[in-house]
Amino acid sequence: MDFLPLNNWIEYDSKPLVIAGPCSAETEEQVMATARQIATIPMVKVFRAGIWKPRTRPGGFEGVGKEGLQWLKKVKNETGLLTTVEVAKPEHVEQAVEAGIDILWIGARTVVNPFSVQELAEALAGIDIPILVKNPVNPDLTLWIGAIERMVKTGHNRIAAVHRGFSQLEKSNYRYPPLWEIPIELMRLMPGLPVICDPSHIGGSTSLIQPISQQALDLEMQGLMIETHIDPTHALTDAKQQLTPQSLVSILNSLIIRDSNGTYETERNLEVLRKDIDNIDDQMIQLLARRMEIAHEMGVYKCDHSITILQLRRWKELFADRINKGLLKGLDNRFLANLLRLVHEESIRIQTNVMCEKENKK
Ligand code: PEP
Ligand code: MN
């Protein structure tokens, strides 16, 4: 798939590209006051504002609607910033394009639904406009890829993915935990696709914007979309996560832009460490393969002796023992628990297969 590099469709001289603006357009004054301050920050090239707001429950502020598009037009004319809004329905596309909005974005709640994405793709066919595709709320990489593919199929190549974190049942400091492995896998599967991070929705609070942004840059994401409001405490949506333009400046100034290609010296040193990692991974794979062979043997034995596959007591003891050993070695508790569950799940799967095969042969 051919994606145009981000700097071919948005001019920006220093990395990263920054998109900033309020979660929602609320009044003309709020939009203009925010935009005027944002326009003085050289790194910010695009002004964002939600006009149609998808809310989880009805009854909240659902956006100012079409009227807000005129405010964005004014932002563009007065400040020279490019503008972007979220579109969720074909009529949004039509109205936004007519108002001269420069970039459209598809929100996390829309990307979960291929019917809606397809409708948008059809509405966008033949319209030459860049599109940002946010990840779906649930951690499903295929849905994200599917939405991007639907845009590509209707002839678009100015596309970027926006990583805004994922809903999870587990308690977390994040509003939507980043699950970095998902956007990393997206970058691997869709080389050339620009990825922009939205630390505002990932963090859900202003104190997390800086570290999340830094991590995104260290993972070679090319842009940041950061919610910024002239008066965050009185914002009608997402008040806790919106920065003032002043704090946006200090966060942007604090970010360290690292080189993706180091010097000869740093590369050589890294190469040595990479070799060690390669060796360890090889050993890990050998050991896992051996462990699964034993699981297979156990499956055969349990089947022959009519013993159940899962012995809860043994699993509990094993789990506690391995966690303790891992903690003593300085490994993270959650990481260990996830790893053990994954390995255990695979052993159970192998043993279940053995049982089924043997039963079928009877
Ligand atoms: C937003 O950007 O304000 C928004 C609604 O985002 P998301 O679709 O990521 O929830
Ligand atoms: Mn928001």
Image (cartoon, helix red, strand yellow):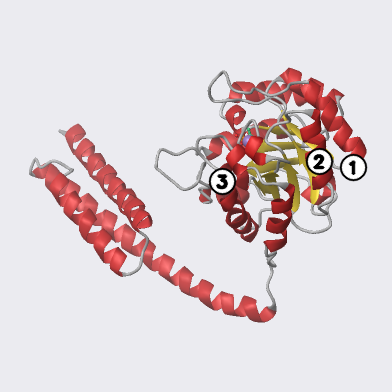
Q: Is residue 330 above or below residue 206?
A: below
Q: Position of residue 340 (x, y in %)?
A: 30, 53
Task: Tell which of 167 and 246 is nearer to you.
Answer: 246
Residue 35 has which mark? 2
Q: Nearer the viewer, residue 1 or 103?
A: 103
Q: Residue at x 76, y 28 (%)?
A: 27
Amino acid of disc 2: Ala
Q: Are marks 1 and 2 in contact (CB under 8 Å)?
A: no
- Label annotation for residue 80: 1
Identify the image quadrant of the N terminus: top right
The reply, left or right, for residue 335 in relation to residue 221 is: left
Quarter of the image for residue 30 reads top right
Place residue 160 in its image quadrant. top right
Q: Amino acid at mark 1?
A: Gly
Q: Earlier in the sequence, mark 3 or mark 2?
A: 2
Q: Which of pointers 1 and 2 indicates the residue nearer the eye?
A: 2
Q: Quadrant of the C terminus?
A: top left
Residue drawn where x is 74% and y is 55% of the image: 249
- Left or right for 220, reference 30: left
| Sequence-first disc among 3 and 1 | 1
Does the rendering let one see residue 2? Answer: no
The three-letter code of the residue at mark 3 reads Ser
Determine which of the numbered discs, if any, sits on residue 5 in the image. Answer: none
In the picture of the structure, the residue carrying the numbered disc 3 is 205
At label 1, counting other C-alpha atoms closer than 10 Å, the crowd grade (few under 14, some 14-19, many 20 or more) is: some
